[in-house]
Structure formats: structure tokens, C-alpha cells
Image (cartoon, rainbow, N blue to C red):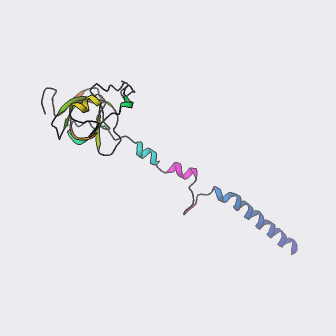
Amino acid sequence: MLRILDSNALATILLLSIVAVAAPACNPHYGGKPSAASQDERPSRIAKATARPPPDLSGRTRIGDASFYAKKFAGKEMADGGKMDPHGDNAASKTLPLGTRARVTNIDTGKSAVVTIQDRGPYVKGRIVDLSPSTAEKIGITQDNGVAKVKVTPISVPLPNSSIKSGIETPDSKP
């Protein structure tokens, strides 16, 4: 009888040892830190934050805030492969396709300029376009005010099939 008791005690100790060693590898149900396997199954917060919105091929006018490129971006490569020219008509949009030509009108001043979307951004909530410093100056956005409410009206929108869709505005029309 003592021998059976000893073997039961030994089996219990062995079983508890296995459980103690294996337990940290199990997924916790409440509280605890998730394992690497459970993290792979959930969508990443980083992926959501950096996911790009789908391109807007509608040609519709949009209203929002505009800002301008900081001086440190002069000469840096843009999304289309060109260099950011602080004196050019280049601009950035999160949703307009690269190569889109659009008229940007400052709602407060009524001044406008035609730009070409060559880059992605701005990545600040509420902003719909970043402009080259010279274009921003043309429409009344200065270092002092930095941001202005604008209307962005596409003139021509490149489509995925290599055709061009006319926007609401034509190149010759005035705001």
C-alpha cells in the first residue's frame, strides 16, 4: 500500500511540474499579457494608423484646411519620385491621385492657384492639402497664419486605366 501511495505522490508531483513549466506558454483568459500568437491574429494598431484611404477619383470639390511644406522638405523626394520644389506648383493630398491638377482657393482671400498633386499627406486631421511655400504665399497662407480654409477643385484626375477624367473646373475657368 505504501508503494502505491508513493507512486501516486510521484505522479502528482510530476504532473504539477509539467503544468508549472507549461503554464506560462498558455494564452491568458483575463488580464495578463497576450502571447505572440494572439497578437498575430489581431489587426495591428499601427496598420490602421498608416493605412491609406482609397483614391478619390470622383473629381468633386472638397473644402478643408491647407498648410504648406516646411523648409526642411525642400529638395526631398516626393511620392511621384520628383523633388519638392519650394517655388513650384507641387502639392500633397491623401486621396487625390498623383498627377491630379487642381485649383486651390483660399476661402478668406479668394486668391487661387493651380497645383499638381505629386506627394502624399498632409497627415494632420482636418488638413486636405499641403502646398509648396510659393503656392501657399500666392493664395495668402503665410508663416504667420500657417493654415487656411481652402476649396480644392480638381481640373483633371488621372485614372487607373491611364485615361484622364475632367474635374468640375476646366483649366481656363476662373474661380
Does the magenta segment cover residue 28? Answer: yes
- Tell me where residue 28 appears, x and y as whole percent: 58, 60
Whether residue 28 sits left or right of residue 61 in the image: it is right
Residue found 15% across the figure and 29% down from its top:
170
67 or 9: nearer the viewer: 67
Does 66 appear above or below 35?
above
- Quarter of the image for residue 99 reads top left
- Tell me where residue 50 appears, x and y as whole percent: 41, 42
Residue found 45% across the figure and 48% down from its top:
45
**The N terminus sits in image quarter:** bottom right
- Quarter of the image for residue 124 reads top left
- The magenta span reads 25-43
- Quarter of the image for residue 149 reads top left
Magenta segment, prevailing SS (helix, strand or loop): loop
**How many marks do you count on the picture?**
0
Residue found 57% across the figure and 57% down from its top:
33
- Tell me where residue 95 appears, x and y as whole percent: 30, 38
Does the magenta segment cover residue 119? Answer: no
50 or 23: nearer the viewer: 50
Does 10 appear above or below 162?
below
Find the residue positioned furthest to the right: 2
Find the residue positioned furthest to the bottom: 1
- Tell me where residue 153 appears, x and y as whole percent: 20, 35
**The C terminus sits in image quarter:** top left
4 or 135: nearer the viewer: 135
Find the residue positioned furthest to the front: 144
Does 14 appear above or below 174?
below
104 or 97: nearer the viewer: 104
